[in-house]
Image: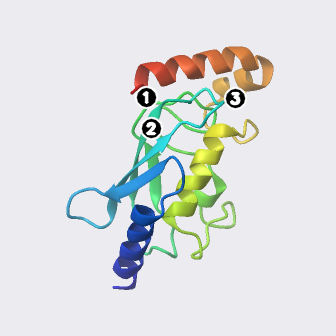
Amino acid sequence: MQRATRLQRELALLATEPPPGITCWQDGERLDELRAQILGGADTPYEKGIFNLEIIVPERYPFEPPKIRFLTPIYHPNIDSAGRICLDVLRLPPKGAWRPSLNICTLLSSIQLLMAEPNPDDPLMADISSEYKSDRQLFLLRAREWTEKHAGQ
């Protein structure tokens, strides 16, 4: 009951006061299956891209973080080909930084920030991370190409 009430409150807030470039909604009847869209930020290789995400809210939410993954392919050192995201707030301690005071809006904003500022020192995609560190221009070119191909409007 507490989970459902909290999720309804979070979704209402996301509907009325969404962060810039982020939308989130219920996927069908189930309250624990959500979808989100993040617009690629200005001055990033993801600019003008629309990235779709899947959010699965566990039974133990908010004591356990939601499972969030990209449905839209993205060329990024911290996001793998299955859309899984390497981000500390998506993991429980001790390795992660999730706490029950965080919410879905905070997580989506953190993912949007990660898109703008990759963390090559904690990669899921080692080859893209190496490219990001050693040849930033090539990384930016490939990320833009992927954005145009997979996330173009």
Q: Amino acid at mark 2?
A: Phe
Is 120 situated above or below 20?
above
Front residue of this view, candidates 96 and 20: 20
- How many residues crowd mark 1 within 10 Å: few (<14), some (14–19), many (20+)? many
The secondary element bearing badge 1 is classed as loop
Say which residue appears at 62% left-offset and 51% top-offset. 87
Q: Is residue 58 visible?
A: no
Quarter of the figure that contains the N terminus: bottom left
Q: Quadrant of the rendered structure where residue 89 is?
A: bottom right
Front residue of this view, candidates 153 and 30: 153
Q: Residue furthest front?
A: 16
Q: Earlier in the sequence, mark 2 or mark 1?
A: 2
- How many residues crowd mark 2 within 10 Å: few (<14), some (14–19), many (20+)? many
Residue linked to disc 1: 151
In the picture, the disc for residue 51 is: 2
Instruction: Tell me where residue 133 appears, x and y as whole percent.
Output: 78, 25
Q: Disc 1 or disc 3, which is closer to the eye?
A: 1
Instruction: Tell me where residue 124 appears, x and y as whole percent.
Output: 61, 37
* Tag 1–tag 3 contact (CB < 8 Å): no
In the picture, the disc for residue 117 is: none
**C-alpha gap between disc 1 and disc 3:** 21 Å
> In the drawing, does residue 61 fall left or right of residue 26?
right
**C-alpha gap between disc 2 and disc 3:** 20 Å
In the picture, the disc for residue 129 is: 3
Is 52 situated above or below 9?
above
* Tag 2–tag 1 contact (CB < 8 Å): yes
Instruction: Tell me where residue 33 appears, x and y as whole percent.
Output: 32, 59
Q: Quadrant of the rendered structure where residue 125 is?
A: top right
Q: Earlier in the sequence, mark 2 or mark 3?
A: 2
Say which residue appears at 59% left-offset and 17% top-offset. 142
